[in-house]
Image: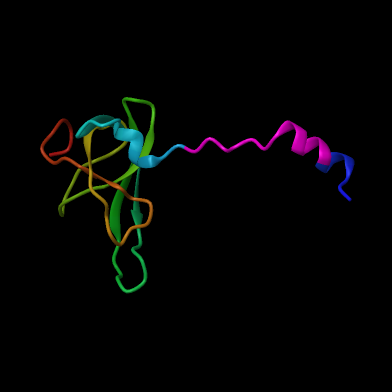
Amino acid sequence: MSTIHQAASKIKGRRRKKRLNALRSLFKSPQKKGIVVKCRLMAPKKPNSAKRKVAKIWLSNKYDVLAKIKGRSNFINRYANVMVCGGRANDLPGVRYNMVKGKYDFT
C-alpha cells in the first residue's frame, strides 16, 4: 500500500535532472576563446605522481571548464585570454581540454 505522497508523486511524474555535458561546451567548434579564472596544481591518478598545472577557464559561451596548461614554463595568471581545444589529460580526472600554445596571452 502506497502512502499519499507516493501516490501523488506518481501522478505528477518524475522530473528528470537536466544534465549539462562538459564535452558539449565547445559547441561543435574546434577551439573556443576563454578567460582564466583560477590557476592551480593538481595531482594525477594512482600510478603517476607529479604536480600538473591546470586552469579553470570561463569560455565565451558561458561554460566553465578545466584545461591543462601544456609545456614547462608558463606565465598564465588570472584574467589571461587563452584558446582552448579538446583533448583529455589521461591521468587527471575531470580535465578534458588543453590550452593552445602561442595564441593570445599563452606564449
Give yes or no for residue 94 being in the magenta stretch.
no
On-image quarter of the C terminus: top left
User: Which residue is at 30% across, 48% downward?
Assistant: 96
Residue 84, x across and y down, in percent:
23, 37
Residue 77, x across and y down, in percent:
28, 39
User: Which residue is at 76% across, 33% downward?
Assistant: 11
Left or right: 75 as drawn, with respect to 21? left
Classify residue 106 by image quadrant.
Answer: top left
Classify residue 35 by image quadrant.
Answer: top left
Magenta residues, start to end = 7-19
Q: Is residue 59 above or below residue 22?
A: above
Q: Nearer the viewer, residue 73 or 100?
A: 100
Residue 10, x across and y down, in percent:
75, 38
User: Which residue is at 74% across, 31% downward?
Assistant: 12
Residue 19, x across and y down, in percent:
49, 38
Left or right: 57 as drawn, with respect to 20? left
Left or right: 2 as drawn, with respect to 22? right
Q: Visible in this render: residue 36?
A: no
Q: Visible in this render: residue 78?
A: yes
